Amino acid sequence: MRWLIWILVLGALATGLTLLARLNTGYVLIALPGHRVELSLNFALILLVLGFVLGYLLLRFLVTAIELPGRVAQFRAARRRETAHGTLVEALREFFAGRYARAEKMVNQAVALGEPGDLGAIIAARAAHELRAPGRRDAYLAKLAIDPARPDAAAAISAAQMLLDERRPEDALAALAVLPNKHTAALRVELRARQRIGQWEQVPALIDQLEKRDVFSVEQADAERRHAWRQLIQRKSGDAAGLAATWKRVPERYRRDTAVAGAAAAAFLGLGQDAEAADIIERSLDREWDVTLVNLYGECSGAGTLQQIERAERWLKDHRTDAALLLALGRLCARQQLWGKAQSYLEASVALEPTYAAHLELAQLHERLDHVDAARAHHHASLELAVAQLNRSGAGRRRKPV
């Protein structure tokens, strides 16, 4: 419909101009020395319009001719950028497909064609890292000029991850140190690095940040914190002051955790602080029953042994068939020279679950009571159980002759 309207408009315009030209009887006189040129006004107007159009076209042609080299250069640069971008995309596709050698080659081609050198160096470094070529990887990383005022997070995190893969956590932390504000990926790398180094003091705070960012669920965060506190306690096991200070820093909910409490009790026992170890075990066992803690409880000695026996006998009302608790009671009673109770508890433990430790305790008890035959029998039984346990674990198996 629109083209029909344009035809009607142009037809009407042509008709109007034709009628106007018939009515216009004017002329144009051009006087030159020795010449006189007389033109009708209509023809002069037509020549004027044609001259303007020709002049405009000539000017456009000249401008286009002058700008042509620049436009050709821009066209070639655009084609080069398109080729470089396509090569980079293909290099990324090859990298994620696991064809690292081809990815490294193509990303170098993309950089040569004009893609950003820092991005290309990162991708090439990751590809060389996957190809186990640390020399090439380090050469690519050396091309990254890191500005301390504006650090490149991609370069820093990529370098840290690769260094961490090479078991160089200190260098990984140094690579992350340039970042003023660490986002989630950087925090995850830092957590792994500090765990490998053993800087457990800083691990709980990192876990808190990652939990807030939904990297860890509540259960995962709790497990990571428990592991961190346990490792930190074990590292302080030879330092009485450091162990006491660390235990004070442990949150209450982890103090009652059996794994953390077990590590702390073992550390305090190793330092001869049996009363502190017994208190830790009692608090944890009141919250959750654990056989490992019960065994440690039987090893606690000191002035409060009678109170320990009373506490353990109260637990026995709810755990009558717990062989570990009976063994612990036997040890505690033997320490207090309550020979009859010690023997009954140890024999009950052996009846429920014959173990190397229970038979050995009974053997030592009978030696104190000068029961030579009984002591010899329990020593023999404890040795058999120990050998059987070694055989089950594979440590006591002989290598078959080739």
Image (cartoon, rainbow, N blue to C red):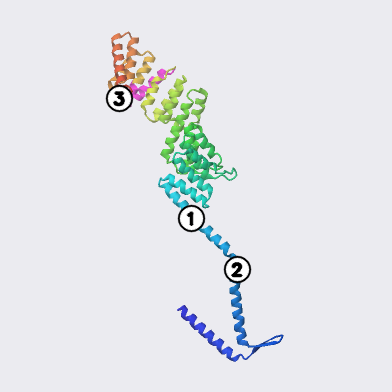
Residue hosting label 1: 83
Helix, strand or loop at label 2? It is helix
Give the x, y percent position of residue 306.
Answer: 40, 18
Q: Is residue 119 visible?
A: yes
Q: Residue 392, labelled with which disc? A: 3
Is 162 in front, or is 385?
A: 162
User: Which comes before the other along the chain, label 3 or label 2?
Assistant: 2
Amino acid beneath label 3: Arg
365 up-or-down from 119: above or below:
above
Q: What stretch is highlighted in magenta?
A: 303-326
Q: Residue 63, labelled with which disc? A: 2
11 up-or-down from 248: above or below:
below
User: Which comes before the other along the chain, label 1 or label 2?
Assistant: 2
Q: How far apart are marks 3 and 2 (CA)?
A: 93 Å
> Would residue 80 be counted in the magenta stretch?
no
In the rendered structure, are the residues bearing label 3 and label 2 in contact, judged by CB atoms less than 8 Å apart? no
User: Which comes before the other along the chain, label 1 or label 3?
Assistant: 1
Q: Residue at the spot x=50%, y=31% of the render?
A: 249
Helix, strand or loop at label 1? It is helix
Q: Distance between the residues labelled 1 and 2?
A: 30 Å
> Would residue 316 be counted in the magenta stretch?
yes
Q: How far apart are marks 1 and 3 (CA)?
A: 65 Å
Q: Residue at the spot x=52%, y=50% of the render?
A: 112
